[in-house]
Amino acid sequence: MLLMLLPVYVGAQTREHQQTSDASRLEKWYQQVLFAYYQDDLDGALLQYSLLEHYYPQGLQQLPASLYLHPSEPELLKASISLTRGLEDQAAEIFSRLLANYGLPEKRTAAWFSLGLSYYQQGQWSKAYEAFSHIDAKEALSYLDTSTQDQLIYLRVQLANQHALGGQAIQWQQQLSADSIYHYYLSYNQALTYLALGQTEQAIELLQQLVSVPEDGLQELLPNWLRPFADEQSEAEYMAKQQEVLAIQDRVNLTLAYTLLQQGKSHEAYSAFSRIRREGLDGDAALLGYGWAAAKGEELQIALGVWQSLMVLPEHSEYSLEAYLAAAYVYEKGFAPRQSVATLQLGVQRFKQTLVELKQASQTIQQSEFIQSLAHNYSALKPSIELPAFTAQRGATDDLLLTRLVQSAGLQKNTRNQLAALQQSQMIKQQLNEWQQRLSHFSLMLDERQEQRVERAKNMLQARIFEKLSFLQNRRDKLAEQLAAAQQQQDGTSLMSIAHQQSQARLSTAQTRLSAINQQKNALQEPVLNTEYDARLRRIQGILSWQANEAFAANSWQAQQALHQLDTEIVNTAEQQRRLLAMLAQRPDYAQQRQRVAQLLSRIEEQLARNQDLQQQLVAKVSAQLELSVSQFKSKVQGYVVQAQLALVRLNDQALQQNQNELGAESKVIPADIGRPPALEPQARQQP
């Protein structure tokens, strides 16, 4: 029965050992995932995930519980990393499958928020609305911090407005914290909605309420938002939030000012423009509108001074260019046609120069190297996109124009996403190139190992180490003869230990010396030595002989066994030597390793080709979006040229008619003289 049960037991033990080994390897794979994740190597973590699932398709569900807190956590971690690295579809599939039944409400709430935020940033409004709908209000209040709660409410309000759920939007907006900056955003968006619907009075009223917040309660909002807590936020975060609040105030004042200006309320618009910071993002737009408000209020000198400050700016923006047309309008309204014409002519020159630079910018944008370098310098953490360093050889004005165009296009989310994707593609290409180089080095290493193996075989053959076996065989034969002779003569002395043989040798030496002494004494006719010493030697001889005879059988058997074991070792050694000689005779073959390297190189080349195609597509998209920005600005500038030329024609026509009507044919002024400096006119015709 034991013999029958033995195979079953051995098989069970083998399967148990194999399962233990598989579990250990699986645990090591996931530990590599965690190591890469905690080292902020998200790409490496995703790679380890892929390798783990390749070798263990159901491995994420079989991990030991000591490595995580919840059964779904390994897959949720993969989804979170995928979401961070832009693999939204993969992340959405995991989230949708696991989060509905996820046991930990804290992590479930955070995961649904991350998924909804990702969908919102991609413009997938329906999916974002659905993801946010999984977040319970009580769980959001318990597991999300105040700023995240406010952001969630803001996004929900935005999505509710898109789904025509205005009642829910108002209800959610009331849940915002008292000092939340999203009050500003939502109220401002509502004001823009009123303007789009033509409800101007409601929009103005709401914008004025936002402007009056500093007097009615912004003192409470700003200290909570802008006070720099050393243990909670850094100085950089504090400054960023401060600039955000000030930028919102500027945008509210700008929208209010232009709305009032369109309604003919120039004085109120003048006051609103004056509250906008000159160094802010809306500084140039506010300055242009400030001049128009002054011009509408008949303060022509102020308007002219404001617009001239815009005209001298080196940057070719729509505000600095439009200032020429506005200044010409003020000159014409102030009865200074010559200054108006001169301003228009300067404006036309500036417009044409801008068109030339736009053409150069368009050529630069079409260069793949420019887009690649632009993506290389891109960082989602920076508020603006930096221009590549290789544009430094261009002029300063060209750089200003190109920078403005790139940054204006970079404000669009699609452009930023594509630049971020292109930057990641560049990183992937760099990684693939490194792997390709490593595999090339590995192929060279195989060549070196092959040469080293050939050289080692040559050295071993030259060292004549294989001749030692025959010498050992001869020694074995002599030992066998010695054993056979001892067995035949029944002489166990040669089989005794070394100590016994040393004692026998000393005894023989003593007997030889005693015999020599006695012979000398006989020759000298002297009495021999005392016979007691001779008797002692004979007793020792007897003892040694008796010991050898007693141990003869055991020693003979041990010697026979040792000789048999030596024969076995010689046979094994001869077999190993034969196989070694056969291996040395063969040339080393690394075909399997070379085939594996070739397969990996082929896969890398395939991935490089796909990555190159993707980069070309992304470069084309970014270039097209930048080209659209250039084209739109070019259309504006061309419109400015047309307006300026029409104004010049009109002014020349008015001057011609005036000369014909007032001065007569003999004293009329040539229309071309209108563009001369005012000092050439008679003093009586100079106008303020």
Image (spheres, rainbow, N blue to C red):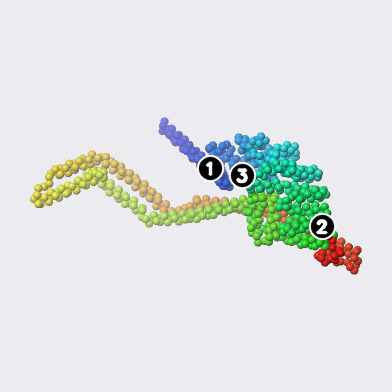
Q: In the drawing, does residue 659 fall left or right of residue 542?
A: right
Q: Identify which amino acid the numbered label 1 is placed on.
A: Gln
Q: Which residue is depicted at the point 67% across and 54% down? A: 620
Asked whether 491 or 141 is in front, the reply is: 141
**In the displayed image of the protein, which residue is found farthest to the top?**
1
Above/below status of 91 relative to 370: above
Asked whether 402 or 231 is in front, the reply is: 231
Res 312 quadrant in image: bottom right
Disc marking residue 330: 2
Asked whether 168 or 545 is in front, the reply is: 168
Mark pair 2, 1: CA separation: 74 Å
| Crowd around label 1: few <14 · some 14–19 · many ≥20 (10 Å) | some
Residue at the disc numbered 3: 230
Q: Identify which amino acid the numbered label 3 is placed on.
A: Ala
- Residue 164: percent from the left, percent from the top? 75, 40
Res 656 quadrant in image: bottom right
Disc marking residue 31: 1
- Marks 1, 3: nearer the viewer: 3
Earlier sequence position, callout 2 versus callout 3: 3
Q: Which residue is depicted at the point 17% across and 47% down? A: 511
- Marks 2, 1: nearer the viewer: 2
Q: Are marks 2 and 1 in contact (CB under 8 Å)?
A: no
Callout count: 3
| Crowd around label 3: few <14 · some 14–19 · many ≥20 (10 Å) | few
| Crowd around label 2: few <14 · some 14–19 · many ≥20 (10 Å) | many
